[in-house]
Amino acid sequence: MASAAQADGWTSRSRSVRRSDLVWTAGVCAVLLLQAVLILTHEPFVDEWQALQIAVQSPDLASLLGNLRYEGHPALWYLGLRGLGAIVGAQWALPAANLILALTTQCLIVFRAPFPRWLRLAVALSEPILFEYGTVFRSYALGVALTFWLLAAWDSKRAVWLPLILLPAVESFFGIFSLAFLAYRFVEKRLWWPGVAAWALVSALSAWTVIPAADFVPVYPAAPSPFAGAVLLLQQFSIVAVPWQWDGGPEWNSIPQSGWFHALWLFFALLCFDQTRKRLLDRAILAGFFGVLLLTYAFSYTLANRHLMLMGTLLIALQWRQSLRGGSLGPLFRIWVCIGAACGVATAATALAMPFDTAPRVARIIEQKNLAGEHWVSAPAQHAQGVSAISGMLFEGMGAGCMNDFVRWNAATTASSRMDFAGWVQREAPRGRFYLLIQFPLPRRSPAVEIAHVGPGYDGKEYYLYRVGSDGEPPRKALPRCVPGMKPLPPRTSATLVNLR
């Protein structure tokens, strides 16, 4: 009897384990499939196209590095896109990069993170991991993949050094990540001096590549004052606590305007304090990274949500390392990860229900109306960038005095982002017929005639198409390219345009 009861107990436990394994396997497959679908249906916006255009259209490496003087980002992401463009084609380089990087990140999290299974899935589904650094085609996908690769290889003697060395070549904030990891290797007496030397060399080269050109002007200005910057940063920093981007509706890179939401940064501060008890180095690293964000916001340029969310990624990375050594997970940390997962699922549903950017619709309208051969003006100068990348058209940047497909952030381009659009159209109307693609509607008294309006996608960008001048007037005088010598970006085919949603 005892043996039979014992056998029944083992059978019951075995079935429970099998069910648990099946649920886990299904969860992992669902996460990976969701990530791939989000990437393959994502429609890039200006900043994503910018990196691809610089990477693919620069005629040589020297030109590519010269163009980066106006970007503020090191070369690793651009070199990767250049290589992928040569292999899979320019229009597939961005999704191919994210498929490789984001799926690698997800696999590292679900198979290597030292967390309970349910928490690994929650981290994988969190809004920053799933969308900001997994779906959106930016260098952050590369930086986050390297970060989790480094953590997965932490206890190795040599493999850990390759991602650590490469991090500064992605972006300055990931360079700070690498400093933090170097500090831990030092504390653990696990420095490998050839690796340290390689890290120093890559860091120096990366810093050299981002030395700005003499006429570089950042498009996003700094806060009016350091105090105002601190206040604005704290309000926006609540997005790290609850990563739900909303402004009267789903809108990427925005935050809910309710006063209670602006105070949620206190929850994240309490979380960091609670999770780093008796871990002074962890606490100092988090405080130091926040200080860098604050100084950047106050004195350099306004940060986007994706920059601030790196603070949450850093907290996960620090906890990953501590958990390898038996560190506990506090209840606030578990709650925060679950909130992030709920926001990630909601963001995924939003992204699948609406296009991220509606530039393909604009390109389709221009093609259907046979207007691709007309003289087009973009306001602001970068607003037509997605249309240009899709169709191969060139646009005059309003006020820039030249034609572009990608944007060089210099004084002329930045000025065109802040000028009186309606006044410019009024002054330029007598100089020949042209068509205008603009982000905001023009007043009724304007000489421009609206021919189409395309509503915003998840990124909130609207497109208004106008004709300035009658069909019988001569076209506006042709202008030279803003950046001569660039190669054309192979456009999507007409058949592709017709089938875009």
Image: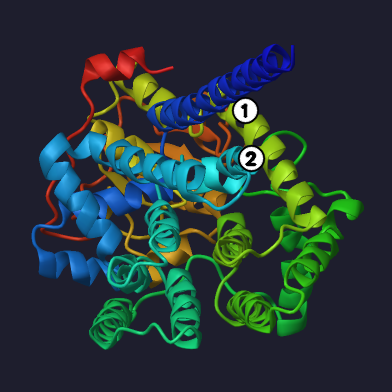
Q: Nearer the viewer, residue 322 or 76?
A: 322
Query: Residue at coordinates 25% horizontally, 43% vertically from top-left?
Result: 394
For numbered disc 1, what is the local secondary structure?
helix
Q: Dividing the picture into quarters, in which one does residue 282 lie?
A: bottom right
In the image, is residue 295 above or below residue 422? below
Q: Residue 325 placed where, x, y %? A: 58, 67
For numbered disc 2, what is the local secondary structure?
helix
Q: Nearer the viewer, residue 123 or 473?
A: 123
Query: Residue at coordinates 36% horizontally, 69% vertically from top-left?
Result: 167
Q: Nearer the viewer, residue 8 or 429?
A: 8
Question: Which residue corresponds to mark 1?
Answer: 350
Q: Residue 357 placed where, x, y %? A: 48, 34
Q: Is residue 245 visible?
A: yes
Mark 1 and mark 2 in contact (Cβ < 8 Å)? no
**C-alpha span from label 2 to label 1:** 18 Å
Question: What amino acid type should be assigned to the residue bearing mark 2?
Answer: Ala
Q: Is residue 434 visible?
A: no
Q: How is the image coloured?
A: rainbow
Image label count: 2
Report whether 423 appears left or right of 368. Answer: right
**Label of residue 183 in the image:** none
Who comes first in sequence, dot 2 or dot 1? 2
Q: Count neighbours of disc 2 (C-alpha within 10 A) and say few if under 14, some if 14 to 19, many if 20 or more.
A: many
Which quadrant of the figure contains the C terminus? top left
Report whether 214 appears left or right of 343. Answer: left
In the image, is residue 309 above or below residue 116? below
Question: Which residue corresponds to mark 2?
Answer: 122
- Give the foreground label among 2 and 1: 2
Q: Dividing the picture into quarters, in which one does residue 244 lie?
A: top right
Question: What amino acid type should be assigned to the residue bearing mark 1?
Answer: Thr
Q: Residue furthest right?
A: 260
Q: Count neighbours of disc 1 (C-alpha within 10 A) and say few if under 14, some if 14 to 19, many if 20 or more.
A: some
